[in-house]
Image (spheres, grey):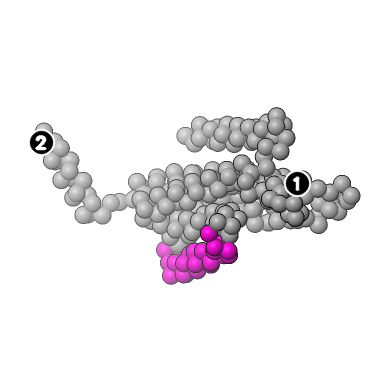
Amino acid sequence: MPWPRYLLYFIVIAFITWALTQMEIASPGSLKLHVLLSESDHFGTSEFSPVEIIQAIILATCGVIMGWVARYCPSQRPVAIPFTGMALAFLVRELDYYLDRYIVDSLWQVIIVIVGALVIVYTVRNRKRLQIALARLWPSPGLTLLFAGAVILFAFVRFVGHEPLWTSILDEDYRRVIKLAVEEFIELMGYFLWMTGTIEYAFQARAIAMAEPQPAARRRRVKRRHDAEGRF
């Protein structure tokens, strides 16, 4: 039954959100959503914020889970590999500040272009297998949650986090940290949906893999291993 998992998702998401809000209330500025690195820095950065660190951890977790699906659920590999590439690209995008500052400027853009190109080429070359994999999977609660997270990340947050909107709403009271706080917490919500959808997709992909008939060679290996264990 999936209900205990959904209850666990609710508890984990609620606890993390509560902890972040209480951290800021107890110690104003502890979320580091607007850090000025120098006196001449007027824009500041939120890259050191615990919110963005959690986002990066979620993306890394999603990438690892999708990589596991690609390795151990062959029929879902055409779906899992593109999602793994997307998680990697988003993770690189979240780490762009550190890559630019501590390694090479604009390195994150090069990595994203390479990863994106590989994902596109793989998807085009395996489009028929992708259609078959989606047909076996649909309807899918996991993909539905992934789609909901994508809507928030690609559309909703881009419009709601648009700076001219907040300068219009707040007028003379505008402060960039307000816009950043709203934007980052909405993004965190989208990433929570992605993580939940990824986990649910992995459970469904595993169930499909276990229900599929095993190749003859694999059945023989399992039988030989079972017979060898039965001798002792």
90 within the magenta span: no
* Range of magenta residues: 103-129
Nearest to the eye among marks 1 and 2: give it. 1
Q: Secondary structure at mark 2?
A: loop
Q: Measured from the top left, where is residue 162 in percent x and y?
A: 75, 56
Query: Relative to 128, does residue 218 appear above or below in the rendering?
Result: above
Name which residue type carries label 2. Answer: Arg
Query: Relative to 132, does residue 44 appear above or below in the rendering?
Result: above
Q: Nearer the viewer, residue 31 or 189?
A: 31
- Which residue lies most toward the top here? 26
Q: Nearer the viewer, residue 57 or 156?
A: 57
| Circle 1/circle 2 CB separation < 8 Å | no
Query: Relative to 38, does residue 19 appear above or below in the rendering?
Result: above
- Magenta residues: mostly which secondary structure? helix
Q: Measured from the top left, where is residue 193 in percent x and y?
A: 58, 45
Q: Which residue is mark 2?
A: 231
Question: Is residue 142 visible in this depiction of the protein?
Answer: no
Q: Which residue is mark 1?
A: 177
Q: Residue at x 17, y 40 (%)?
A: 226
Q: Nearer the viewer, residue 222 or 160?
A: 160
Q: Secondary structure at mark 1?
A: helix
Q: Residue at x 45, y 55 (%)?
A: 80
